[in-house]
Image (cartoon, rainbow, N blue to C red):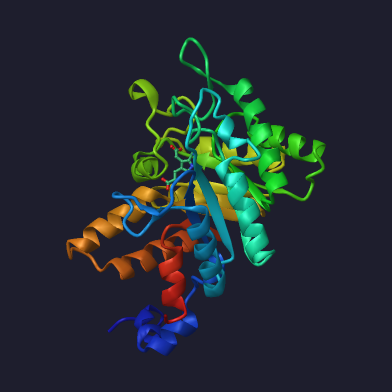
Amino acid sequence: MAFPEQRLRRLRRTPALRRLVAETRLTVDDLVAPLFVREGISDPQGIASLPGVVQHTRESLRREVVELAALGVPAVMLFGIPAHKDAEGSGAWDPQGIVQLALQDLRAEVGDAVVLIADLCVDEYTNHGHCGIVTDGGEVDNDASLRLYERVAVAQAEAGADITAPSGMMDGQVRAIRGALDGAGHEQTAILAYAAKYASALYGPFRDAVNVSIADGGDRQGYQQDPRNHREAQAEIRADIAEGADLIMVKPALAYLDVIAAARAITDRPVAAYHVSGEYSMIKAAAERGWIDGDAVALEHLTAIKRAGADIILTYLAREVAEGLRGG
Ligand code: PBG
């Protein structure tokens, strides 16, 4: 006979008891839907490695965001796919660039009902696929890249972004962007810093979604973090907060739950986690084969990310989870 204090199963007996003592609650308010908008297409395009996700036209994006708003999803994160790429990624800050146009469309369509977040990077817009300026020696030049990010931040704020989200992992990017925004009168535009962003193989499907391949078989290990490092992530988070980040992000999510927990412990700022493309695709692929219950695994993943300490989850599952949570 177990000692009384060991009878932990009493509170697991009925669904109502379990609901009463649940420590973590996933709600629609936690979710941010990442969305892709592509210049120069007349119909949405499917993405083979991200089933259920599409490259939107401006019009289909507008409809999608209206529907997400109706489901109660509080925020979206926009990524653009330009018709033309160049060495500097000028489409990222062109006032007529696809994300700037989409931000204006959405602001006009939904007002303040949905938080508009714009990913701030240039890799979707550069012909070499790197997140900044590449020198003749093949390096990504940190400070030259910051000058590009400043322009992108201001263009996004001018187009109506509530939050700009620098994802390029250049040193000093939050400080540079904060300065540029304030200098242009955009003190109210917030910064969601991809603070601890790892050089992960889980971004593969995303690169299909945004038509990015890195030149000469390159990778991002010279600027994104090494998955072997935990303390370094804390240094990144502290640096971004000191530079003025309003919210910080850990990315990917499931392989980095320890980093999410550390982030929660070292800051009172909201902590976001990005359940990235590969994490989504693994669920979809296994579910398609009947090897796992995809809906159940999806909820388990997102709940674990919250349990680890995230306040906000960026996920391609946002729409289906919002529908499920409201019993739709
Ligand atoms: C960079 C960026 C990437 C992702 C978000 N922002 C790709 C990268 O760093 O190579 C990945 C997101 C995902 O995999 O879902 N613009």
Say which residue appears at 81% left-offset and 36% top-offset: 183
Residue 52 position, x and y percent, is 35, 60
Q: In front: 196, or 219?
A: 219
Rendered-image quadrant of the C terminus:
bottom left
Res. 309 in view: no
Res. 164 in view: yes
Residue 211 vertical position relative to residue 128 in the rendered view, above or below: below
Q: Which residue occupies the extreme top position in the image?
A: 137
Residue 218 vertical position relative to residue 33 in the rendered view, above or below: above
Q: In front: 38, or 16?
A: 38
Rendered-image quadrant of the N terminus:
bottom left
Q: In front: 249, or 69?
A: 69
Say which residue appears at 41% left-offset and 62% top-offset: 317
Residue 153 position, x and y percent, is 67, 39
Q: Is residue 80 left or right of residue 155?
A: left
Residue 326 vertical position relative to residue 148 in the rendered view, above or below: below
Q: Is residue 201 left or right of residue 262?
A: left
Say which residue appears at 58% left-offset and 30% top-offset: 90
Q: Which residue occupies the extreme front position in the image?
A: 42
Residue 24 vertical position relative to residue 51 in the rendered view, above or below: below
Say which residue appears at 72% left-offset and 45% top-offset: 158
Which quadrant contains ligand 1? top left
- The image shows a total of numbered marks equal to 0
Residue 121 position, x and y percent, is 55, 36
Residue 54 position, x and y percent, is 39, 54
